[in-house]
Image (spheres, coloured by chain):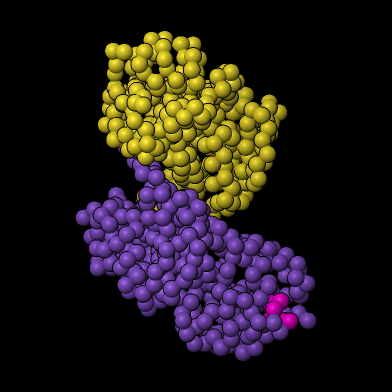
Chain colours: A purple, B yellow
Amino acid sequence: MTVTALFADRAANWARYEDVLHKAFAEKGLDVNLVRDTDAPENVDYVIYAPTGPISDFAPFTNLKAVLSLWAGVEKIEGNDSIKVPLCRMVDEGLSEGMREWVTGHILRHHLGMDAHILGQDGVWRNDVVPPLARSRTVGFLGLGELGLSCADAASKLGFQVKGWSRRLKTIEGIETFAGAEGLRDILTTSDIIVLLLPDTVETQNILDRDSLNLLPDGAFIINPGRGTLIDDSALLEALDSGKVAHATLDVFREEPLPEAHPYWAHPRVTVTPHIASETRPETASQTIAENIRRGEAGEPFIHVVDRTAGY
Amino acid sequence: MTVTALFADRAANWARYEDVLHKAFAEKGLDVNLVRDTDAPENVDYVIYAPTGPISDFAPFTNLKAVLSLWAGVEKIEGNDSIKVPLCRMVDEGLSEGMREWVTGHILRHHLGMDAHILGQDGVWRNDVVPPLARSRTVGFLGLGELGLSCADAASKLGFQVKGWSRRLKTIEGIETFAGAEGLRDILTTSDIIVLLLPDTVETQNILDRDSLNLLPDGAFIINPGRGTLIDDSALLEALDSGKVAHATLDVFREEPLPEAHPYWAHPRVTVTPHIASETRPETASQTIAENIRRGEAGEPFIHVVDRTAGY
């Protein structure tokens, strides 16, 4: 039986997804009518969804079986009350690999003090400072979901002392773990480099504010590939100006694209990257979408279903 | 019985080594008279040697038991015919760890295209290019000694396709290995990023010359924390100018400090770092020195003895 799937992302992504989705469907033996728009929403079985696409009201999709997100983060949709069916987030191997590479690269960049060399090719040979070894540096990860764990594991394998904080305490080999308000204080006071990989929830908003930034060791580094809302931007700018925070590398922002006039762009202690730390890769993401359609048609439970009471 | 060890490195390093050497000797129960100079070379049992120190003629040390190098590279001393006793090179855990961190950091820097962000904070949000994943990039290591292996292993753990070349073929899990002239051609034609960690020998000098640089894929990256003599500098500058090589990060040079007027400093596709990729760390290096003195006094074979016929 043919199922109908509506591709609801911006037009520019259609070209990236059309072929690889068809390929993934074929590999699973699925007969899918993949459309970009429809006059008969009642005939749509699955919406392949991105917040940048055209759909926000799901009420017309009266026979919908699931909403399959192309994004790992679901904070822009999980509170949408017009969704009455399972909402599945994207879990994409490529996403996790890309994030691990980006985070590890920027941890090492700060650890090694690379910027001084990249920006300072002035002909002066300064070899008097030996940087510390990774074994004497602590990297603290806020957020131990799939992405946080993958990054923490890579840092640990490189020899860093790794600490991790999550809402509920987890036990993970090679990582000293913390939870709760007291745990947050412990990890912030002892981490030379802080990596933010938390979801955007009521509890995590502004988790780095004036008070928590003040807990950091002097000259700490902050890396945020998580969510823009995790940081109180004014408090971070103050901490950068005072030198409390030596540098912040920020990939996500409250407003994206980050406005040209935003002080982050011009700040000498900030590196802005344009939400590129990790992106869903069409080839691997299409396999996750196809697997959930296969499960839906076979009457099996969906994978990666969002627990909409927890917010992620 | 008291043994006499002469510390033959430049004066500036005495302050870094004096205490930690005494500590390492004490930990092994050794009674060592550690001196910075002597009027009685015939009483010296061990010379703790660096090429930057005052000693080059070992003939006066008529009762010497071993020369213990503070440097991993021994090309400045291994041809010294006045040495009639075992020459031991430095193997320092800190050296290998520091090298792994520096090399992995610069591999990821090039892989992720970080420089565009570090140098280009111009307020323009360019998020249209998703970099490839490590799994679709090949990193080729020339040199599979202790340092090369440690770096290759780290790159492999991060997901890169890793190839390695050495004079004699080695079999290493997770790494596709090559040897000889034909193998060199294979690894050069297929590596997006080349890392040089070979010793300086007659065979390795100018291993990257005009012919071998031409074998690289267009837009390859070169990282040289090995030896300055491995590269034909004129040929590399040509390859950089033509765009054949996208970027070179160079930590070692034929002349160090690299002269201020050298074209590498001003070249937009070159990053010069001042021989900092890895340095011997006094704390860990002193343990290697102490262990060899303990062995010498106990009549046990020295560790890390240089095979002076092979040149490393």
* Quarter of the picture holding the C terminus of chain B: top right
Q: Nearer the viewer, residue B103 or B261?
A: B103
Q: Picture quarter containing residue A66? A: bottom right
Q: Could you tell whether A105 is left or right of B133 in the image?
A: left
**Residue B25 image offset from top left, x and y in percent:** 36, 34
**Residue A154 image offset from top left, x and y in percent:** 50, 55
Q: Does the stretch in magenta take in A297?
A: yes
- What segment is highlighted magenta in the picture? A293-298
Q: Does the stretch in magenta take in A216?
A: no
* Quarter of the picture holding the N terminus of chain B: top left
Residue plotted at (60% across, 62% down) = A93
Q: Could you tell whether B15 is left or right of B254 in the image?
A: left
Residue plotted at (39% across, 72% down) = A179
From this view, report whether residue A304 is shown above or below residue B91: below
**Residue B175 image offset from top left, x and y in percent:** 64, 43
Residue plotted at (54% across, 72% down) = A50
From this view, report whether residue A268 is shown above or below residue A215: above
Residue A169 in view in this figure: yes
Q: Picture quarter containing residue B27? A: top left
Q: Nearer the viewer, residue A303 or A169?
A: A169
Q: Main secondary structure of the magenta part?
A: helix
